[in-house]
Image (cartoon, coloured by chain):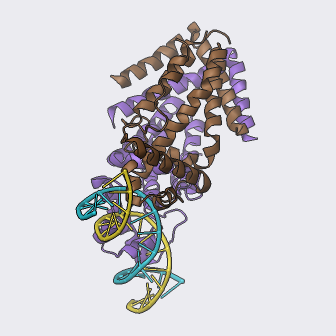
Chain colours: A brown, B purple, C cyan, D yellow
Amino acid sequence: MSESSVVAGAVSPDAAPGETPATARGELTRARILDTALDLFRERGYDDTTMRVIAARAGVSLGNAYYYFRSKEHLIQAFYGRTHAEHLAACGPVLERERTFRNRLRGVMVAKLDTLEPYHRFAGILFKTAADPASPLHPLSEASRPVREEATALFREVVEGSTLTSAGRARSRRLVDGSVGLIDRLVAISKLPLLGRIRRQGMQLVRELEG
Amino acid sequence: MSESSVVAGAVSPDAAPGETPATARGELTRARILDTALDLFRERGYDDTTMRVIAARAGVSLGNAYYYFRSKEHLIQAFYGRTHAEHLAACGPVLERERTFRNRLRGVMVAKLDTLEPYHRFAGILFKTAADPASPLHPLSEASRPVREEATALFREVVEGSTLTSAGRARSRRLVDGSVGLIDRLVAISKLPLLGRIRRQGMQLVRELEG
DNA sequence: GTCTATAACCGGATAGAC
DNA sequence: GTCTATCCGGTTATAGAC
């Protein structure tokens, strides 16, 4: 029940959930294309990186790039898988060390920011495509399932491993710090009888929407 | 100080903020293109509606369509302007009639859902493009300024015209109803001394992030 | 100066041969 | 697995008509 369960169960970073596996050499070609793409995304952003340029720099034909990645967006999905794996690794020590809900939550969130920092520049595109319900990048899409389930498990562990009783970019970091503190207090205070009625109202709303 | 200030101050529905005005006949052509586009969006969705088809059905050349609308996304911006105008009109009676914060907020939000209902099908694309910081559709973009300021004024009026002391799709409607009730109670309860510390903490966080 | 049209460009995606 | 050839649609260049 330690965090090793989560970290150990990681999907192979570049397995590109739901995507063509491959044979020995194909796996290399695939990795080369992804590496090239992520480099280019960092350098020039997403929109200014064409599939043709990715293919060229990776030393394959355009059609071949599409053999490994069904679409340009699927490269981002692979990006998710890769950074998620890094995030899991970074969380290991934090979850090992911290026991309060507050510190565990903060540690996990700050680790995420650290992991994504090098890609800050093209973060915008992630929101854009992820917000499209039809995109394979949508958090609830089938393609996102593996990473989604792992991320869920990660947060479950944040909660379960904590006692829950105790009380990058500089602004983002401050936001995480501050928000976590607030959430922590609100969660604690929501147990007071005074708020029982409001909480029940909220819970019922959620339940109704599920049904 | 009645809501007439907001309703009266509406931008002309299709003025396409920041876009080419026009002469007599041009204005008609422009409206025809927009009508055609919105019809097509409703019928077949956004992605399946090509600029070529819009132009053809509107009886103009492709290049001509681009004379009036800088890009396909700008058609959506015009859509915002139009539905926003309808929303304002629908809000008039509500704000005239209701005086409690809760009912005013609910009325305005339900009116929005009603206004957008016919376009439910392509709502997804709105989130997608709006989430892109570089898009003219982004809520904070310069192109969005006119509608944004009017919408802000509308909500200001929801608050200012209320006493704030009293306590479509079926699920969306239920969500609005329920959420509004919750917000109302939370706003009320946040005045209790018990929550003073948390509120201050939250306010300070917001202030810091601004500075 | 306002409007309209034709032809091209560019990049994501696909078809199909090897 | 890999390539070449092509499609398709958003966008632009540009020329000319009112």
Above or below residue A209? Residue A137 is below
Residue A177 placement: quadrant: top right
Please say if B133 is above or below A13: below
Residue at x 55%, y 38% (from the top left corner): B158
Task: Look at 36% across and 37% down and name the residue there.
Answer: A18
Where is residue A142? Give x, y as percent: 36, 35
Q: Residue at horizontal 56%, vertical 7%?
A: A193
* Front position in the image: A91 or A164: A91
Q: Within the image, what quadrant is residue B196 found in?
A: top right
Point out residue B197 in the picture as x, y percentages from the top left corner.
Answer: 72, 19
Relative side of A93 to B60, left or right: right
Residue occupying the point 40% across, 75% down: B63
x then y, percent, for residue A206: 42, 22
- The image position of residue A176, as x and y in percent, is 66, 30
The C terminus of chain B lies in which quarter of the figure? Answer: top right
Horizontal relation, residue B114 to residue A164: left or right: left
